[in-house]
Image (spheres, rainbow, N blue to C red):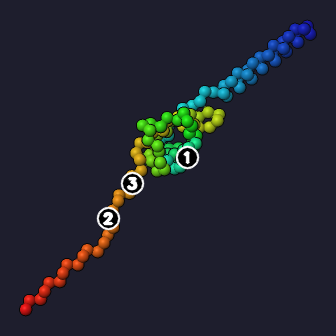
Amino acid sequence: MKKIKAAALFILALLVLTQAALAAEKTDAKPKYKKVTGNVVSLSKTGIVVKSKAKGDVTMTVTDKTDIVNGKAAKTGDKVAVNYRTDKSGKTATRIEVLSPVAKAPQTQPVTKAAAAPAAKAAP
């Protein structure tokens, strides 16, 4: 009888450990892929922050594997679409596309006073 109880406890312990291992495996889930569209708040060689209406400020890491579409580097203020991966290490940009660059301020000519026209001579 004692041997049966010991065997049952051993099997029960084995089942509990198996369930714990499976639960730990589920927490190491695959990375999730997401997309954010908005304006670049700041950027560097290693990171980018995009302000989105729906998600607010989203900070992502940029790596040498990040795909820059058409080779156009983003600048602060540009509207961009960024595909990124979320995993246990954080958010990593996988693709950055500039949708519309910041418009440059139009160059205007400086305002100068027009040369005064010569005064008309009085009639004699």
Q: Which mark is residue 104?
A: 3
Camera-nearest residue between 39 and 13: 39
Of labels 1 and 3, earlier in sequence is 1
Q: Which residue is mark 2?
A: 109
The local crowd at label 2, few if under 14, some if 14 to 19, many if 20 or more residues have their Cα within 10 Å, is few
Q: Residue furthest right?
A: 2
Q: Which mark is residue 44?
A: 1
Picture coordinates of residue 92, whole percent (x, y): 57, 37
Helix, strand or loop status at disc 2: loop
Of the 4 image quadrants, the one containing the C terminus is: bottom left
- Name the amino acid, label 2: Gln
Picture coordinates of residue 80, whole percent (x, y): 46, 43
Helix, strand or loop status at disc 1: loop
Mark 2–mark 1 distance (CA, rounded to whole Å) = 34 Å
Instruction: Please tell me in which quadrant of the rendered image residue 113 appears.
Output: bottom left
Mark 2–mark 3 distance (CA, rounded to whole Å) = 15 Å
- Name the amino acid, label 3: Lys
Of the 4 image quadrants, the one containing the N terminus is: top right
The residue lying at 23 percent from left, 78 percent from top is 116
The local crowd at label 1, few if under 14, some if 14 to 19, many if 20 or more residues have their Cα within 10 Å, is few
Picture coordinates of residue 59, whole percent (x, y): 57, 44
The residue lying at 47 percent from left, 37 percent from top is 68
**Would you place residue 120 above or below residue 84 in this image?**
below
